[in-house]
Amino acid sequence: MRVAKACRQCRSSKRKCIRSDSYGPCVQCSKRQIPCSGKLKPIRAAQLLPCHVESPNAQDDDDDGANLPEDTVIELVEHYISKIHDRPHSLFHLPTLRTSVRKGALNKALLLAICAMGSRFSASAEIRKLEHQLTEKSKRLLLADLENICLETIQTCVLVANLCAAIGNSSSEALFFRISIGMAQIMRLPLVDPGDTVVMGELKRRIWWTLYMADRWYSSGLDLPRQINESERSTELPMEESTFRDLPIDQLALDTPWKPGLWAYMITLVDVFGPIQDLNHRIVQEHVEDEEIDRCAYDLSRKLDAWERSLPADIILNEENLQLHKQKSNGGPFVALHLGFHHYSTLLYFQYLESKGTSTSTTKMFAERCKYHASSYSALLKFARENEGFKAVYPTVGHMAIVSSSVLLHTLLFGDEDKISSARNSLNANFEALVELEHYWPSLKSMV
């Protein structure tokens, strides 16, 4: 029956508000799969985030699912922080982000992009269904103001690129990454302004390195040339994450000794990842002699070994450091660093699983290394899933788990008898991880 008072969604869009259940959503909201204010506890206007950008189409604003209660917005932002931030990208100074969200001072497109990513981890099915609407609204607002070249626009582009990648839209992913890199180059982002606070300088640095790393990832998938040249690489590395997180927004100089953080080691590691991609690309696209492949692989192998040896005592992967970084709220990024190391190593040695005619001692050694890193990746991912404080649920984890699984499957089919049981257990662990990840990122199903 028709109720005397329409819900906010129907009232704003001038639709008839009809409901058969006084406590359930109205027919229109149920059909559009959006939260209905007639079902949810009424929220005063003061409780909604005031950050708003006018749209020429008022009905679109109502349909975007963006007018979420403040506590829901904060929850989605926290999901993003705890599960995504500092893993595939590092874009924010967390105290500043949280303050801006609570004050309603964050750019609307950026806020929607963060909420879209965080919505995937909500316990509420209704909130999870809003991910597409939140993403599309963020994208529309971003494109409408694309000439506003600033940090918030770059941050939004990076998040929208990741959201496109999450649904398998690699062309749009590349487009938004290229826009963000172009803006960063126009702003000369690697060059920190002398008048910047410590936080602003570090934030610029982290955004630039995020783009540098993304440039190595997305360009490979579409066989595109990289946009950031090695000559643009000469900028300072990011500082230790806990130090950055604790900095006051207005501090003009660092009052503690500078120390490289986890992201600094991610960057030096991705310096090896780029050449590994290039080598694998050459092997597929060109006729490369085995001797040349072996020479390049050996050189890259030495660089990976040197990177691992260069790690300071508190960055080495062991039980003590896992707990140390968990206490610092850096457990997830610490795991992400070492998952990346095992994945890049697996990619380098992958070609040596199949014998190329005459097997040499080097070929056999590289094949064993490939199996070792694939198994180590699986073991670390299993640990992260079974222990609080080490979340590894960003999309590329699934891609890397599939590569690990392909090596484990090779061992299961062709390996020695004494390694089959271990490979089967690792494959099962990877399968369980992929089932969980598909819940958040359905596009993984097509990859599997």
Image: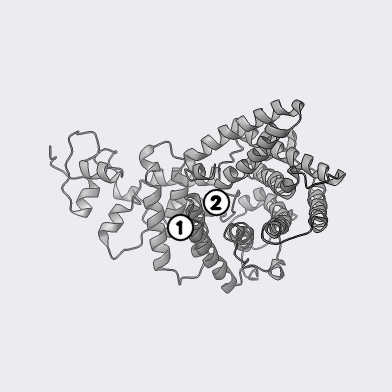
331, above or below 146, in the image: above
Estimate the x, y position of residue 72 in percent, counting from the top left.
40, 43
Amino acid tagged 1: Leu
Residue 173 seen in this snapshot: yes
Q: Quadrant of the N terminus?
A: top left
Tag in front: 1 or 2:
1
Badge 2: few (under 14), some or many (20 or more) residues near its Cα, within 10 Å? some
Please give left or right for residue 285 compared with residue 289 in the image.
left
Of labels 1 and 2, earlier in sequence is 2
Residue in the image at 18% along x and 38% along y: 19
Closer to the camera in the image, 10 or 291 = 291
Estimate the x, y position of residue 214 in percent, counting from the top left.
60, 58
Q: Secondary structure at mark 2?
A: helix
Please give left or right for residue 220 compared with residue 351 in the image.
left
Q: Which residue is mark 2?
A: 95
Q: Which mark is residue 110?
A: 1
Q: Secondary structure at mark 1?
A: helix
Residue in the image at 62% along x and 59% along y: 220
Quadrant of res 418: top right
Q: Are marks 1 and 2 in contact (CB under 8 Å)?
A: no
Estimate the x, y position of residue 290 in percent, counting from the top left.
80, 55
Total marks placed:
2
446, above or below 291, in the image: above
Residue in the image at 23% along x and 48% along y: 8
Q: Which mark is residue 415?
A: none
Amino acid tagged 2: Pro
Most extreme residue toward the front is 357
Most extreme residue toward the right is 361
